[in-house]
Amino acid sequence: MTSQETTRWAIVGGGMLGLTLAWRLAQQGRRVTVLEAAPHVGGLASAWSLGDVVWDRHYHVTLLSDSRLRTVLKELDLDDEIDWVETRAGYYADGRLHSISNAIELLRFPALGLLGKLRFGWTIFYTSKIRNWRRLEQIAVGTWLRRWAGRAAFERMWLPLLRSKLGETYRDTSAAFIWTTIQRLYAARRTGLKREMFGYVPGGYARVLERFSERLQEEGVEIRTSSPVTRIAGKDGRVEVASKDGALEEWDHVVVTAAPPLAARLCEGLEETEARQLRAVRYLGIVCASVLLDRPLSGYYVTNLLDEGLPFTGIIEMSALVRPEQLAGMGLVYLPRYVESHDPFFEVPDEEVRERFLEGLFRVYPDVGPENVKAFRISRVRHVMPLPTLYYSENVPDMDTSVPGLHVVSSAQILNGTLNVNETIGLAEDAARRFAEHP
């Protein structure tokens, strides 16, 4: 046996980051165990039951240009099965729904004048041409967009889009955020494709994760679900992990994939500067309702909300993307609300969230009512996406810590991309290449 084959690695967290990292380490000849607190793997990509339908707990799509994700799906023999669809986008403005799925519809959009529309389009084009994203970390996203798009386009178009992904924390976000968003949407076009398509694997992430788990076990990876970790500390050159049931186990290397503030609470023995840096990373969370309706809505995959007073920050209709037979002929709608991890909205009771969210949905779609709702579930996750604040890249925690054998790999280390499964897989593979140097 080589030294790598006798080295034991534990990965704390069984989301797509942890699973991909486990796979790549196993392919290097490592002995790997995944420790997942939940009864199932997947993390933010996990699936759940909504009435008679099993689908993703949060909304996900695959783009043609998502090369890292598609490589993994190809290895899982799933890439050829992706169903590709050209979707439509809608805007809710002045109490009405409008389709803005192409340039012609944008020019017809009544909520913004011609000059504002031209400046809106120019801002997207100009930002897409920038290559040095780090200089955009020095300016607030609101300041950047007002400068290039003007006040009218900012307030009527950009501001609702920022709030749909960032809530009110857009005020603390750098312009690098809008750069990464535009770059992802332009990626396919730069490779010669005529248009961007959205895709999904039939069966959703439930099927992806089932296949992934099977392949991991074939590679010798042990997956332990319902295994919450309570403490991690160095011990005599190794790393000791304490489980909730009181069990202690030692490993040569431990990789924590939790958000940095959570990692700081788990890991003992870090230098104070390290712990402070981990705690300082601000995270956005999400309260996201999944609504199963007896029929699809309007056919807009995304409905952006320009009118104020709605309790959620956007409407995502998965049934506008996914074929009816995948959802038993029902309509599946996600109503996300992005808030900072400590926001009091996380404490609002389920019944109140349900009442407020459905009232908002019926306002946008007045032809839908309580009789059309077949199921309703709420997901609350406090740590979803690190907030890309000013000068963010200068304060990113390192993957290696001062505790020998202890590593922290998280979404906070995605520097030049938006948080999505493709970027998460890219981060895992970067980490695996780096850890290849370790014994």
Image: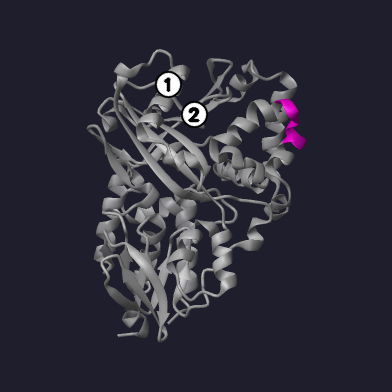
State the residue lying farthest toward the left. Answer: 52
Asked if disc 2 and disc 1 are in contact, CB closer than 8 Å, the reply is: yes
Q: Which residue is mark 1?
A: 359
Q: Is residue 397 visible?
A: no
Q: Is residue 306 visible?
A: yes
Q: Is residue 147 magenta?
A: yes
Upstream in the sequence, badge 2 or badge 1? 2
Quadrant the C terminus occupies: bottom left
Q: Is residue 211 magenta?
A: no
Residue type at mark 1: give it.
Glu
Could you say where residue 372 lies in the image, as x and y percent from the top left? 31, 19
Could you say where residue 210 lies in the image, as x and y percent from the top left? 26, 51
Q: Which residue is mark 2?
A: 311
Which residue range is magenta in the image? 146-152
Could you say where residue 101 lies in the image, as x and y percent from the top left? 54, 25
| In the displayed structure image, the side of residue 298 where residue 156 appears, left or right | right
